[in-house]
Image (cartoon, helix red, strand yellow):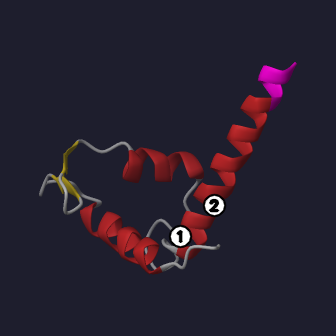
Amino acid sequence: MKRNQLRLWFTSIAYVLMNALREKCLAKTELRNAQIGTIRRKLLKLGAIITVSRRGVLIAISNACPYKGIFATAYNYLSRLKCPG
């Protein structure tokens, strides 16, 4: 019973985060009315090379990626949001 409740919490938190991403970061893109699964498939399931260094994290997405601009727009909006607390 406790495991099912924990899974439900994780699912609920993930939905709230994805919905906030859609409302705050994707409001001026073609994915503003997209379903959560579509956003996940087009933005989060990308093939990329991630390089971690002392200066930061570099995400290298292929130039052939059709949603590279939307990914960059979402990243810019996310980096401007203020952290609560």
Is residue 33 shown to the viewer in this render? no
Tell me the magenta residue range.
1-5
Q: Among all residues in the image, which is located at the extreme left? A: 63
The residue where tag 2 is placed is 19
* Residue 63, horizontal then vertical, whole percent: 12, 58
- At x 68%, y 56%, the residue is 16
The residue where tag 1 is placed is 32
Q: Quadrant of the N terminus?
A: top right
Q: Nearer the viewer, residue 29 or 51?
A: 51
- At x 49%, y 73%, the residue is 25
Residue 6: image tag: none
Asked which secondary structure carries label 1, the reply is loop
For discs 2 and 1, the disc positioned in front in the rendered view: 2
Do the numbered discs 2 and 1 sit on residues whose CB atoms are within 8 Å? no
Q: Quadrant of the C terminus?
A: bottom right
* Residue 80, horizontal then vertical, whole percent: 44, 81
Kind of residue at badge 2: Asn
Kind of residue at badge 1: Arg
Q: Earlier in the sequence, mark 2 or mark 1?
A: 2
Q: Among all residues in the image, which is located at the extreme front? A: 54
Left/right of residue 4 with respect to residue 64 in the rendered view: right
Left/right of residue 82 with respect to residue 64 in the rendered view: right
- At x 62%, y 57%, the residue is 17
Predominant SS along the magenta part = helix
Q: Nearer the viewer, residue 71 or 4?
A: 4
- At x 43%, y 74%, the residue is 29
* Residue 76, horizontal then vertical, whole percent: 36, 76
Please determine whether, in this image, residue 56 is positioned above or below residue 51.
below
- Quadrant assignment, res 34: bottom right
Q: Is residue 72 magenta?
A: no
